[in-house]
């Protein structure tokens, strides 16, 4: 197993649960027996301006916000909000955002003001915390546009030190180094690009995509292409999962990364399961807190807690 490292630091009062600062569930160190591979050199075209400083200060670099804006327009489209979260929750979001002054005119079809930040899945799935954060600000401190609101909330959530393990051969590892990204599995198919994956998310909605990723045997309900990847705050979790793919000359490679918490969905596995009813019926909606996951690494199975954000985070792509 091999590892590459990117750093992380302290938290704010609005910190994201999980990661290395979760005192109730401390991260265990990666064993010294794991071979550490040097990160490949990053070309000047791929370096993110201000990233190192942002990591040290537990903030989000401006370039990272720009990347998010490239993935999805920061405009609160009420029709898309219903697709993403269903009519009932969308109505609740609009009601609470209007009550606190975040959304000034709910009668319009879309909003480009600060409420537009809710269009980003990492904010929309944390909308209650976003509304509470906004309400805590003095009026003069409140951002006046969606970009400023996304930046402010992202900084308040901070970063998460988390992990992604993959079973890779030499060519697979070199591809990640060449692209400076870890792609969702759907992106590896011929003719599929980032735009295709965003179209899947926009068409089926954030919640449905999250449900189909959790219950992956139903992925055909969104066209058979998974537009997301998972991160795990405990290296053991992702390594156990990846062990099931370590065959044919592939080794498990463990990537340690620092990501803005807002890049991930603000839903636990249990919360995703509870939202599965409209798409899969009642079968999965009563998901237990604990679930047993058998793997080649631990054939008798490992028990995971579905109520912890750290167990699994869902993101669209992982840019380095």
Image: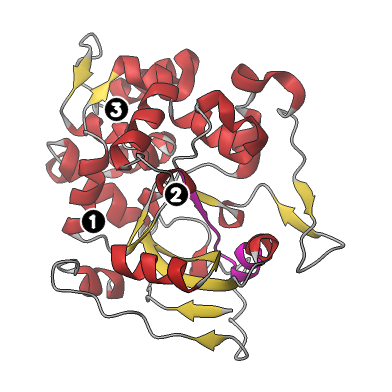
Earlier along the polypeptide chain: callout 3 or callout 1? 1
Q: CA distance from mark 3 to mark 2?
A: 37 Å
Label 3: state its secondary structure.
Answer: loop
Q: Nearer the viewer, residue 152 or 218?
A: 218
Above or below for 132 versus 231: above
> Considering the image in quadrants, where does the C terminus appear?
bottom left
Residue wearing tag 2: 184
In the picture provided, is 6 more to the left or to the right than 62?
A: right
Residue wearing tag 1: 64
Give percent across and percent down for residue 103: 24, 23
Residue wearing tag 3: 100
Confirm or deny contact between disc 1 and disc 2 (CB under 8 A): no
Above or below for 26 versus 113: below
Give percent across and percent down for residue 212: 58, 33
Which quadrant of the figure has residue 124?
top left
Q: Residue at x 28, y 56 (%)?
A: 155
For the view shown, which residue lies furthest in the right direction? 300
Confirm or deny contact between disc 3 and disc 1 (CB under 8 A): no
Q: Nearer the viewer, residue 80 or 190?
A: 190
State which region is magenta: 228-239
User: Which mark is in front, 3 or 2?
Assistant: 2
């Amino acid at each position: 197993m091999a590892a590459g490292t990117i750093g992380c630091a302290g938290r704010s009062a609005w910190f994201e649960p999980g990661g290395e600062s979760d005192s109730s569930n401390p991260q265990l160190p990666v064993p010294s027996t794991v071979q550490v591979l040097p990160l490949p050199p990053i070309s000047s075209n791929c370096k993110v301006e201000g990233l190192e400083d942002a990591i040290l200060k537990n903030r989000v670099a401006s370039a990272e916000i720009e990347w998010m804006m490239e993935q999805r327009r920061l405009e609160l489209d009420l029709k898309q909000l219903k697709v993403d979260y269903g009519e009932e929750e969308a109505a609740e979001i609009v009601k609470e955002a209007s009550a606190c002054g975040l959304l000034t005119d709910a009668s319009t079809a879309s909003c480009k003001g600060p409420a537009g930040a809710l269009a980003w899945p990492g904010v929309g799935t944390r909308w209650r915390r976003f509304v509470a954060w906004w309400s805590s600000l003095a009026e003069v401190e409140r951002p006046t546009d969606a970009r400023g609101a996304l930046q402010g909330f992202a900084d308040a959530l901070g970063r998460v030190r988390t992990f992604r393990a993959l079973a890779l051969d030499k060519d697979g590892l070199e591809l990640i180094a060449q692209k400076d990204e870890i792609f969702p599995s759907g992106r590896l198919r011929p003719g599929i690009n980032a735009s295709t994956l965003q179209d899947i998310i926009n068409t089926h909605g954030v919640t449905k995509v999250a449900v189909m990723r959790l219950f992956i045997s139903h992925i055909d309900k969104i066209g058979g292409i998974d537009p997301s990847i998972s991160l795990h705050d405990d290296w053991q979790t992702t390594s156990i999962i990846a062990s099931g793919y370590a065959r044919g000359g592939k080794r498990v490679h463990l990537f340690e990364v620092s990501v803005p918490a807002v890049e991930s969905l603000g839903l636990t596995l249990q919360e995703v399961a509870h939202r599965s009813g409209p798409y899969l019926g009642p079968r999965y909606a009563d998901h237990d807190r604990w679930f047993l996951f058998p793997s080649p690494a631990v054939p008798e199975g490992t028990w995971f807690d579905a109520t912890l954000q750290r167990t699994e985070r869902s993101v669209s792509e992982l840019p380095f």
